[in-house]
Amino acid sequence: MVDPMPRRILVAPSILIADFSRLGEEVAALEAAGADWVHCDVMDGHFTVPITFGPVVVRSLRPLTGLFLDCHLMVTNPQRHIPQFVEAGADGISIQIEVGEDVGRLLRLIRDLGCRSGLVINPPTPLEGLPALLPLADTVMLMGVMPGYASQAYDPATTGRIARVRQMIDAEGLDTLIEVDGGINAETAPEAVAAGADVIVSSNFVFRHPEGYGAAVRWLKALGRD
């Protein structure tokens, strides 16, 4: 039997719990550690309870790093904010399927403005409407927790949902990446990758790893070779 080819796992540390008093240094350390993306959790205090930051932070980071800036808009009116994040230097912009807008139109807008388009789905949201939107999404991000706070426990149903989305993507022959965010640790990350995840978002696992950012990033990347 021929061993399967190793998969490339992209690591996208979330700066949600980074030290914002030295954010540029934090991102430089992530880049030196081998991270692929920087995940920016944008919360508006309406779609989510907390408020985090807006395009000004992305704009300040853009000249400091060549890493892919992955902006997850947890906002109720993404159509107003997408152009601002594009102008600030975002490489990828993800919107929530739950916003109740014309999600397909917004995904097209993101692409038309030159960014990778991402669609995010919360744990309780059914997957039935996803196949029609997959051709418009460069990334589908499955949340392992409800958006809003770091350090939540991973919803075990997420692993099966990743596998279902993997089947949908493969059946259509698409290049869409599966991203997973929320509750990622040493137990849940291998499950997510085995189910078909390509991009791992993590905050606590990376920033609080006892052996440092580099050890955390290397461990996550190695999951693609298991």
Image: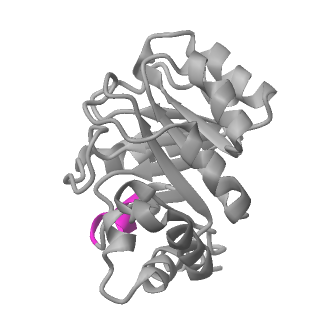
x and y, in percent, of residue 110 in the image:
70, 28
**Which residue is nearer to you in this view: 11 or 17?**
17
Q: Is residue 216 above or below residue 121?
A: below
Instruction: Give the residue at the far front of this rendering.
Output: 21
Q: Is residue 11 above or below residue 173?
A: below
Quarter of the figure with residue 170 = top right
Highlighted magenta segment, given as a residue range: 187-192
- The verdict on residue 162 being magenta is no
Q: Is residue 122 above or below residue 39?
A: above
Residue found 53% across the figure and 21% down from its top: 78
Could one spot residue 137 in this view of the protein? no
Residue found 27% across the figure and 53% down from its top: 150
Residue found 49% across the figure and 77% down from its top: 217
x and y, in percent, of residue 162 in the image:
42, 46
x and y, in percent, of residue 148 in the image:
29, 39
**Which residue is nearer to you in this view: 205 or 64?**
64
Q: Is residue 56 left or right of residue 153?
A: right
**Colour convention of the picture:** one colour
Q: Is residue 194 left or right of residue 6?
A: left
Q: Is residue 3 left or right of residue 113?
A: left
**Which residue is nearer to you in this view: 133 or 163?**
133
**Which residue is nearer to you in this view: 153 or 46?**
46
User: In the rendered image, which quarter contains the N terminus?
Assistant: bottom right
> How many marks on residues?
0
In terms of secondary structure, what is the magenta stretch mainly?
helix
Quarter of the figure with residue 132 = top right
Instruction: Give the residue at the far bottom of this rendering.
Output: 211
Q: Is residue 222 above or below residue 190?
A: below
